Every structure is written in structure tokens, then in C-alpha cells.
Image (tube, rainbow, N blue to C red):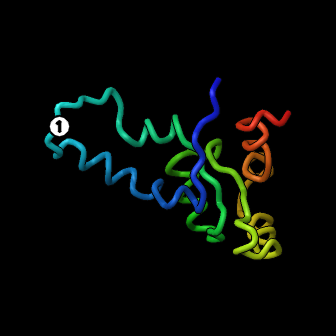
Amino acid sequence: MPSLPCLGHMGELLPFHLSRVDTRLPYLETDVQLAKKPSEYFTENFHITTSGVMATSALLGAVLAIHIDNIMFAIDYPYESTTQAMDFLHGLPLHDTDLHKIAHGNAERLLRLT
């Protein structure tokens, strides 16, 4: 299986615009017919990292938009504080299983580290 693209900075905020793309697509003049909604293609083909975005609301929105299995923790060093990023990670209101996925499980799976 080929590795999938990964976008930093909470997916460059694209996950938060997927519903807009889905609803606007029918109004575009194009001969291209998609079998799925653009949001489905995004979710199936991209992973994101938290790098540089330490907002619980943004993380939870990304979880709802693209699913927890597509999100990985990252710090964005040297531009962001490692301490602040770790505090953000440990303060997330997530079940241990989901926290494990974001903290390292998804990266281990995606990057074939295990």
C-alpha cells in the first residue's frame, strides 16, 4: 500500500471547508462526474497533523470532519513550544484509545513504524 499524503497545520484548515466544497460542487460547470463527494476523497487520501495548531476546538472539528484515524500529533518545532504542544496533547478531552491514535498510533500505522 502506498503511503498517503500528509498535510500539516491541522490540514491547512482544509477539513473545515470540506462541507462547503461538497455543497458547491453541483454548481460548478464541469464535465467531470465524481463517484463520491470531494470530502470522501479527501478523507480516503489524506492525513493531517496538528503541527502549529493547539486549539482543542480545531482538533475536535477535524476529528468530526475527517475521522480520528487520519490525524497525527506534531509540534512544528522550532516555531512552536514543545512544552505547550505536549500540554495541548495531554489536555485533550479524548478517550485513551483515541489519544493513543493521535499521539503515535496513526503515525506508526501510516509510516509503517511497527
* Residue at the outermost top position: 1
Q: Position of residue 24 (x, y in %)?
A: 24, 49
Above or below residue 100? Residue 84 is below
Q: Amino acid at mark 1?
A: Thr
* Residue 2 picture location, percent across and down: 63, 27
Q: Name the outermost residue toward the front.
A: 78
Residue shown at the point (77%, 76%) measured from the top left? 81
Find the residue positioned furthest to the right.
114
Q: Is residue 36 above or below residue 74?
A: above
Q: Position of residue 26 (x, y in %)?
A: 20, 42
User: Above or below — where is 90 with respect to 27?
Assistant: below
Tell which of 66 and 46 is nearer to you: 46
Most extreme residue toward the left is: 29
Quadrant holding the C terminus: top right
Element assignment for label 1? loop
Residue drawn at x 17%, y 37% as measured from the top left: 30
**Relative image position of residue 43 (x, y in whole percent):** 50, 40
Depth check, front residue: 1 or 70: 1
- In the displayed structure image, the side of residue 98 where residue 60 appears, left or right: left
Name which residue lies at 72% across and 51% down: 102
- Nearer to me, 23 or 29: 29
Q: Residues within 10 Å of mark 1 (few under 14, many from 20)?
A: few
- Residue that mark 1 sits on: 30
Q: Is residue 86 left or right of residue 1?
A: right
> Which image quadrant for residue 4?
top right
Asked which quadrant contains residue 10, the reply is: bottom right
Quadrant in which the N terminus is drawn? top right
> Which residue corresponds to the image point at 51% horizontal and 60% vertical from the top-left?
12
State the count of labels.
Answer: 1
